[in-house]
Image (tube, grey):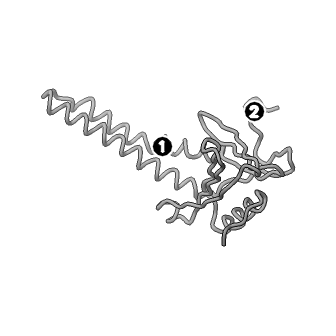
C-alpha cells in the first residue's frame, strides 16, 4: 500500500459494492474558489474595520504593522485558497452502491459517510448564484433525521436529472411530477 494513502478512505474509483466513485464536475473548483475568496475578503474587511475603529478610538498608529499585515493576508489568500480548492476537489467523490449513497470528502478533516436508500426521503436540487453562472447544481439528500442529510455539490447539468431520478428510484420514491 502507498505510504501516503489513507487506509480509512478508499482510493478514487475503488468500490467494494461494484460501483465506481464519481468525481464532481471540474467547474466546481471555480465555485469553491470564488465563494471562498469572497468570504476571505469579507473576513479581512471586517478585521480591517475593527483595526480602523481601534485606531480611531485609541488614537494609536496601527498603520505600519496591522494594515500591512492585513494587506499581506489579502494577497496570500489567493494562492492559499487555490491550493485548498485543488486539494478539496481531489478528495471529493461519491458513488451509488446497491444499498445507498457513499460520500468521501475533506482536506483537513476527512469524512466518509453513507446514506442507505431506505432512509432517503427527499432529493432536492439547489443552485447558488455562482453555481448558476457556471451551470452547476447541488443535490441535497434528505432523510427523517436532519443530522443524516447529505449534499453532493458540483453536478453537471447533463448528469443532474439522471442522478436525481436514479436516487429517487433506488429509494423507492417518485419525483412528484
Categorize mark 1 by other alpha carbons within 10 Å: few (<14), some (14-19), many (20+): few
Mark 2 highlights which residue? 8
Q: Nearer the viewer, mark 1 or mark 2?
A: 2
Categorize mark 2 by other alpha carbons within 10 Å: few (<14), some (14-19), many (20+): few
Which quadrant of the rendered structure holds the N terminus? Answer: top right
Q: Between residues 50 and 72, which one lies in front from this camera angle?
A: 50
What residue do we see at 73% from left, 43% from top?
Answer: 114
- Pinpoint residue 66: horizontal percent, then vertical percent: 27, 31
**Number of numbered tags placed on the structure image:** 2
- Pinpoint residue 57: horizontal percent, then vertical percent: 14, 30
What residue do we see at 87% from left, 50% from top?
Answer: 18
What residue do we see at 38% from left, 42% from top?
Answer: 75
Q: Between residues 58 and 173, which one lies in front from this camera angle?
A: 173
What residue do we see at 27% from left, 29% from top?
Answer: 65
Which residue appears farthest toward the front when viewing the image?
Answer: 144
Labelled pair 1, 2 in contact (Cβ < 8 Å): no
Q: Is 116 placed left or right of 156 in the picture?
A: right
Alpha carbon of mark 1 to alpha carbon of mark 2: how far? 29 Å
- Pinpoint residue 84: horizontal percent, then vertical percent: 55, 41
Mark sitting earlier along the chain (1/2): 2
Circle number at residue 125: none
Mark 1 highlights which residue? 79
Amino acid at each position: 500500500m502507498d505510504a501516503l494513502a489513507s487506509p480509512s478512505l478508499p482510493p478514487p474509483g475503488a468500490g467494494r459494492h461494484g460501483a465506481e466513485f464519481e468525481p464532481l464536475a471540474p467547474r466546481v473548483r471555480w465555485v469553491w474558489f470564488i465563494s471562498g475568496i469572497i468570504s476571505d475578503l469579507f473576513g479581512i474587511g471586517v478585521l480591517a474595520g475593527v483595526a480602523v475603529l481601534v485606531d480611531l478610538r485609541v488614537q494609536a498608529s496601527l498603520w505600519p504593522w496591522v494594515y500591512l499585515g492585513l494587506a499581506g493576508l489579502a494577497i496570500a489568500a489567493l494562492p492559499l485558497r487555490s491550493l485548498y480548492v485543488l486539494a478539496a476537489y481531489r478528495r471529493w467523490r461519491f458513488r451509488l452502491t446497491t444499498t445507498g449513497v457513499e460520500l468521501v470528502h475533506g482536506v483537513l478533516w476527512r469524512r466518509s459517510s453513507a446514506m442507505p436508500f431506505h432512509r432517503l426521503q427527499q432529493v432536492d436540487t439547489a443552485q447558488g448564484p455562482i453555481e448558476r453562472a457556471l451551470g452547476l447544481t447541488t443535490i441535497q439528500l434528505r432523510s427523517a433525521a436532519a443530522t443524516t442529510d447529505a449534499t453532493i455539490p458540483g453536478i453537471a447539468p447533463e448528469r443532474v436529472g439522471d442522478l436525481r431520478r436514479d436516487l429517487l428510484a433506488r429509494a423507492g420514491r417518485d419525483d412528484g411530477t
